[in-house]
């Protein structure tokens, strides 16, 4: 059954390829909806000829004036042998020429009404990037695989929302200042063939990358620059196709997702190989449900690298950092919660100018191999953290790693005039205790007592007379001079 269906299909493909060679010039001269209808009608005629029941869906599409542009109609080779760049490019430019009237997107962006470029479930080799025409939106490209040819330019991406590379429309920004709006890339496998990257989204509004599998990039799987609201969700991204424990892991390079813009969301995404899983250098991005096992920290990899010192504004929730951790430079407003760190993965706060403010690392699980790795570590190789305020590292569950916290409690008993608790094994910042609360429980006397010293993260309480007593003490170090909680 399967073999017979396949044979029929390739027969149709051959017919369509010959059709397109004849039809392409007509499509060029006509342009827009009308030429599209003509093209569909011609496709219909060709498809009727074999009179196969399997072709019924195409017939109904043509009758309804479908605005689904099938790349096979344009002569793209779904077997991935011939270069399909020109064919797919033409399907895209026809789709973008097909703007709906009376509906508008943001100023200067043509509303394409939900037009689709359908990859017809094929694998297509392209020698050049598929750069979408600028100033269009409400369009979907979906349903197949693209592979970069061996001579594909190594500094480019398979699919580009990148006006500067759009030769047809002059590459200028629209009157709104954005170049694309509401473009959806869905159900695509993008194989960069170790020639450049997967998708570039530049100066775009409201882009979705959904259910995509992006591999073999040397630069970035997905690169987002300026613009905002790119949603990358439910996708799988890796430089090499592997499922962990790859013998070549230490050689992994590239970045799974590079967010150099604001207000984006990465949701339910796996990064399975790359030197850096997600690199963030724009504010107000949120990462949730991300599983990084891209390159182990032990090989020099980083799961999530936050390179926005001084203004971080990043939320990381419900993620899975699998042998590779989070690094944040001078974090200012960073939230990490509900996440699972496996295999000694941790959070590194890296000092650039010594600022760490408004950081919450709470309610996570950390699991390691008993080697004494800190769950949160300060990298002060560029200088000490000197500007510390509102830092909360608490309530993390720790197994086989060293707990670090900005708050701690202890209870000690003694008989004498001095009670001492050294909190340095657990406190995150050295020599910094902002607040202390203590209670001296003495059942047989009422001694005078006082907090005498907190230097070196060691709390010393003294009483005027020797007593048998229990000291309960609580310290907090992540605070400024006054704290609101
Ligand atoms: C990693 O790269 C080095 C240097 O290019 C090479 O010698 C080595 O064979 C590679 N290792 C693996 C496992 O691919
Ligand atoms: C506490 O120490 C004093 C001597 O320093 C001793 O007299 C007293 O019995 C001790 N109390 C307890 C409860 O051990
Ligand atoms: C507090 O303790 C440190 C370290 O033991 C010591 O150098 C310092 O003099 C003490 N300060 C006071 C006021 O006792």
Image (cartoon, rainbow, N blue to C red):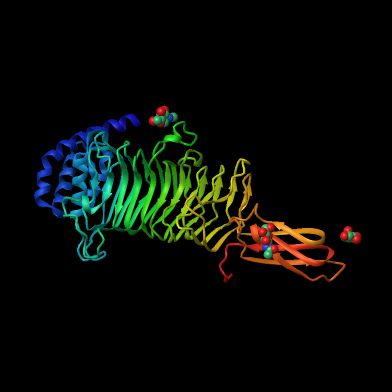
Location of residue 287 in the rendering, given as x and y in whole percent from the top left corner: 45, 54
From the viewer's side, name the closer residue of 467 and 100: 467
- Ligand 3 falls in quadrant: bottom right
> Quick check: can you spot residue 63?
no
Q: Is residue 204 left or right of residue 300?
A: left
Above/below status of 37 relative to 247: below
**Quadrant where the N terminus lies?**
top left
The x and y percentages for residue 6 are 30, 32
Q: Quadrant of residue 310?
A: bottom left
Examine the rendered structure and indicate whether residue 339 appears above or below residue 216: below
Instruction: Tell me residue 103's x, y (percent).
Output: 24, 65
Q: Position of residue 359 (x, y in %)?
A: 52, 60
Badge count: 0
Q: Nearer the viewer, residue 412 or 334?
A: 412
Quarter of the image where one finds residue 181:
bottom left
Name the image quarter holding the C terminus: bottom right
Please say whether residue 465 is visible from this viewpoint: yes
Residue nearest the observer in this picture, 96 or 418? 418
Image position of 163 (left or right of 5): left
């Amino acid at each position: 059954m399967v073999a017979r269906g396949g044979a029929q299909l390739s027969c149709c493909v051959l017919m369509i390829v010959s059709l397109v060679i004849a039809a392409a010039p007509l499509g060029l001269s006509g342009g827009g909806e009308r030429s599209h209808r003509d093209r569909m009608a011609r496709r219909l005629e060709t498809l009727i000829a074999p009179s196969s029941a399997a072709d019924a869906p195409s017939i109904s599409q043509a009758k309804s004036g479908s605005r689904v542009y099938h790349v096979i109609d344009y002569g793209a080779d779904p077997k991935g042998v011939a270069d399909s760049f020109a064919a797919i490019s033409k399907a895209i430019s026809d789709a973008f020429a097909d703007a709906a009237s009376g509906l508008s997107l943001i100023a200067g962006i043509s509303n394409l009404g939900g037009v689709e470029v359908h990859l017809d479930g094929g694998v297509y080799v392209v020698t050049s990037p598929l750069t979408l025409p600028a100033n269009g939106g409400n369009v979907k490209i979906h349903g197949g695989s693209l592979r970069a040819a061996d001579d594909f330019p190594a500094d480019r991406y398979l699919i580009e929302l990148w006006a500067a590379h759009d030769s047809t429309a002059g590459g200028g920004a629209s009157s709104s200042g954005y170049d694309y709006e509401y473009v959806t890339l869905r159900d695509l496998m993008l194989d960069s063939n170790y020639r450049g990257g997967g998708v570039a989204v530049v100066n775009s509004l409201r882009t979705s990358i959904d259910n995509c599998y992006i591999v073999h990039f040397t630069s970035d799987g997905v690169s987002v620059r300026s613009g905002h609201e790119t949603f990358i969700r439910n996708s799988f991204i890796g430089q090499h196709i592997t499922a962990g424990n790859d013998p070549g892991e230490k050689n992994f390079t590239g970045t799974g997702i590079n967010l150099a813009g604001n207000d984006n969301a990465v949701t339910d995404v796996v990064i399975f190989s790359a030197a850096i899983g997600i690199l963030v250098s724009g504010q107000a991005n949120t990462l949730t449900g991300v599983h990084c096992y891209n390159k182990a920290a032990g090989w020099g990899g980083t799961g999530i690298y936050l390179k926005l010192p001084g203004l971080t504004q990043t939320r990381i929730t419900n993620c899975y950092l699998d042998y590779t951790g989070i690094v944040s430079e001078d974090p200012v407003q960073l939230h990490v919660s509900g996440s699972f760190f496996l295999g000694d993965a941790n959070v590194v706060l890296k000092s650039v100018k010594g600022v760490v403010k408004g950081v919450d690392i709470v309610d996570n699980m950390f699991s390691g191999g008993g080697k004494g790795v800190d769950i949160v570590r300060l990298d002060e190789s560029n200088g000490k953290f000197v500007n510390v305020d509102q830092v909360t590292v608490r309530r993390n569950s720790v197994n086989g790693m060293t707990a670090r916290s900005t708050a701690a409690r202890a209870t000690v008993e003694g008989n004498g005039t001095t009670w001492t608790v050294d909190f340095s094994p657990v406190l995150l910042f050295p020599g910094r205790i902002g607040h202390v609360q203590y209670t001296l429980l003495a059942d047989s006397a009422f001694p005078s007592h006082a907090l005498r010293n907190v230097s070196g993260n060691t709390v010393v309480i003294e009483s005027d007379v020797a007593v048998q007593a229990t000291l309960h003490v609580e310290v907090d170090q992540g605070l400024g001079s006054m704290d609101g909680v």
